[in-house]
Image (spheres, rainbow, N blue to C red):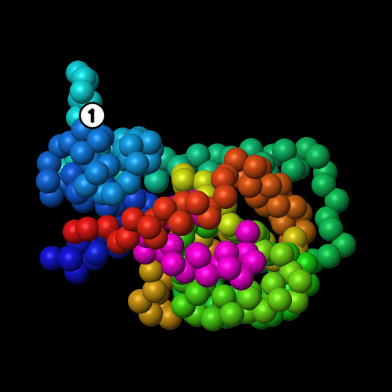
Amino acid sequence: MMDDDADFITRLIGFGLSEKESRTYLHLLKYGSKTPSPLAKSLHTYREDIHRTLNGLIEKGMVKSSLDPPTVYAAVDLDTALESALKKREAELREMEAKKRELQELAAQQHFRPSDEVATFKVIKSIKELVAVMLPILTAMDEDWVYAVPSGAAVLGYQFGMWEAAREFTERGGRIRGIMYDIPYSTAVILKEFLASGVELRYLGREGLIFTIFDRAKTISGISGDVVYRSFKQPLTALWTDDPTYARYLMSTFETLWEQSTPAAERIKELLAEGPPQA
């Protein structure tokens, strides 16, 4: 049963849900509607945390709430919920296409001068390509490395030796700052090792743009797909570029998120003290 739950959660994550949203939705499907307090207790988390997760699921059309107090939350049936999530993704893609056209029109009006440097762009399509691109960059970094990712991406780096290269970088005096959009118990131990090695970690507690920046010059962004490793051929989508203008834009985004986030050490300490969630 546990394997079935883990497989179901993994598929939901691949469909665009966070790990917390996937666990919460599965729990409501299995055990029926609940108010926030019992739900938070069952999932071994806090009321404010479960409220954020439930609001995210409501926005995705996967959970509905009662109108009369006390508010009761129930899972929408799976077929309807997945169709709703799919339509939301399609709407987001249409919105991005519209923004793309607007930016192209504005760029034409501004008459931007091309950079003297010719930027390179590469679409990464698998775990294998991601590792092959990142490892040489990590070993050659001079200044700093920043990233904003779900915790699963950090675990992926740990699995494939990218963390060893990063640790050597901190020993050379490099600075690493990371923002975690989520910190479940399953990643707390690994993230504790990151902190012990001098990585500065912060916790935001909500989903956002996924990206990483190396030496304020090279970037990998827009990572989508299942970040739970199964094989080197496992598909994902990401964009790598050495375009300096895009790197400056992402650095500005990172600094804004950094100010909004909180130190992750206390959250990690709490999770490790609580122990693994019960089935």
Residue 234 on image: x %, y %: 40, 74
Which of these two is toward me, 160 or 171? 171
Type of amino acid at the residue the image marks with label 1: Ser
Asked if residue 199 is among those painted magenta in the image, a careful observer would answer: yes
**235 left or right of 166?**
left
Q: Name the residue tied to disc 1.
A: 65
Q: Secondary structure at mark 1?
A: strand
Question: In the rendering, at what x and y percent does residue 41 appear?
Answer: 24, 44
Identified at 19% across, 30% down, the residue is 72
Placement of 35 over or under 121, stated as above or below:
above
* Residue 206 visible, this angle: yes
**Quadrant of image for the N terminus:** bottom left
The residue shown at (20%, 23%) is 70
223 displayed left or right of 249: left
Give the magenta part as a residue range: 179-200
Q: Which is more toward the observer, 169 or 82? A: 169
